[in-house]
Amino acid sequence: MSSEEQARLRLEIFAELELFIDARGGFASRDELTAFTLRGGLRIPLIDRNKGIRNPAEFDATLAIVSAGDKGRYNVYDDAIDRTSGLLYYSWAQGPLNAGDNRKLHVAFEQQVPIILFEKPLPNLYVPVFPVHVIDVLPERRQFVIDLDESGVRATTATTLDKRYVERLVKQRVHQPVFRARVLSAYNKRCAVCTLKYAELLDAAHIIADTDERGLPVVTNGMAMCKIHHAAYDQNFLGVSPDYVVHINERLLADRDGPMLQYGLQAMNGKPLELPARRDDRPDRDFLAERFATFAS
């Protein structure tokens, strides 16, 4: 396959992966990724069952890598990502740089070919970040340096970016998607208020806002909500008390409008929240109490 054909195939994979992941709530399982098939019928597994680097025979350069730096269920951040620079330091596979799995990842660096990064915050849960680029190789540390910024403005690790830009970059490309994946997984891809099960229409609602230093992207600071209930929660039209009961504010309860208001919001008043099966995944009651006080004021 020529380099031009490889580039077209890679872009086709990226485009179809975006649709594939959106339909699943922002994440996928190992079986789903190993069975990934393009609409034309070509099967291209996106991860390897036994390796962190995916090197399909069709490509001269690596297609995808898996980062499982976040080993614990409640670790807030992936410790392989430098949050001050927006760079991921990815360890070589066993063996030399110019052989085995490392060789094609080094080609991705040399040719600046975009690749897919799969964050693995939980067992059998993969969150894609793409495109990303390999911008450096550190032989003394046996690491590749992956730039999370898709703009391509940073050619080497020596290029520094504005701190606020980097913080926003890491938050938008890694922390928020991983937070959503963790929360939706905990709630079995259902809205905690109305049990809607269409993952494309579900968000991870923060209890303590992520603008607050306590608003960490952990499951206990989130609830899976459909977009209408998430918006209502953020605007304090809907509240959740510490005993896990849904409340609708008096203004909405007194109003008369169409079926969305009547059945989508008013009918939820007094309804028990649909909770995760794992007790450790359930919303923090202290956080709920603090947020509910704002709703009730």
Image: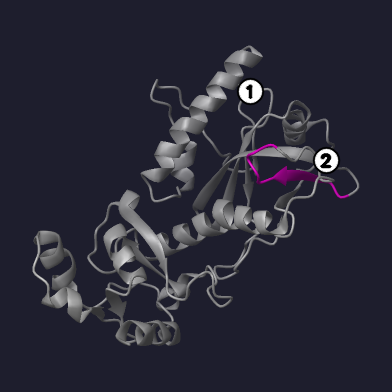
Q: Earlier in the sequence, mark 2 or mark 1?
A: 1
Residue pictured at 53% horizontal, 74% vertical:
215
In the image, which is nearer the foreground, mark 2 or mark 1? 2
Q: Which residue is mark 1?
A: 59
Numbered-mark total: 2
Q: Is residue 63 left or right of residue 265?
A: right
- Reply yes or no: does residue 146 show up in magenta: yes
Q: Classify the position of the C terminus by image quarter.
A: bottom left
User: Pointer 1: residues within 10 angstroms few (<14), some, or many (20+)?
Assistant: some
- Reply yes or no: does residue 100 show up in magenta: no
Q: Nearer the viewer, residue 125 or 11?
A: 11
Q: Amino acid at mark 1?
A: Phe
Q: Which residue is mark 2?
A: 137
Q: Which residues are magenta?
A: 141-152
Residue pictured at 74% horizontal, 54% vertical:
85
Distance of label 2 from label 1 (alpha carbons): 20 Å
Residue 135 visible within the image: yes
